[in-house]
Image (cartoon, rainbow, N blue to C red):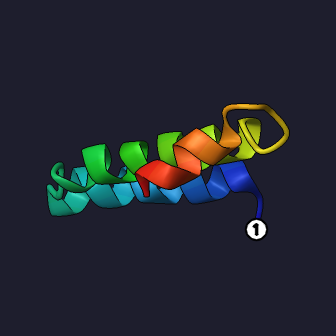
Amino acid sequence: MSKIAIVKEFWSFLRVRKKWWLAPIVFFLILLGALIIFTQGSALAPFIYALF
């Protein structure tokens, strides 16, 4: 299953089941994951990990 298919299926689930409150949660988790991944090798990593 491709990544695009998963996104399409999730979008369809949100539309059909009207679970719009899940969208901000998923967006925040993706943003948080990207922040951790992109700052792993930088000098900011110890400060960001200290927040959590």
Residue for point 25% across, 50% down: 15
Q: Quadrant of the N terminus?
A: bottom right
Q: Position of residue 18 (x, y in %)?
A: 14, 55
Write down the residue under mark 1. Answer: 1
Q: Position of residue 45 (x, y in %)?
A: 68, 42
Q: Is residue 8 visible?
A: no
Q: Quadrant of the C terminus?
A: bottom left
| In the rendered image, the vertical position of residue 27 relative to residue 9, given as above or below | above
Q: Is residue 19 visible?
A: yes
In front here: 18 or 25?
25
Q: Residue furthest right?
A: 41
In front here: 12 or 35?
35
Disc 1 residue type (three-letter) = Met
Residue 22 left/right relative to 31? left
What count of labels does the image hold?
Answer: 1
Q: Position of residue 46 (x, y in %)?
A: 65, 46
Residue 2 left/right relative to 34? right
Residue for point 50% across, 39% down: 31
Residue for point 42% across, 49% down: 51
Residue 23 left/right relative to 46? left
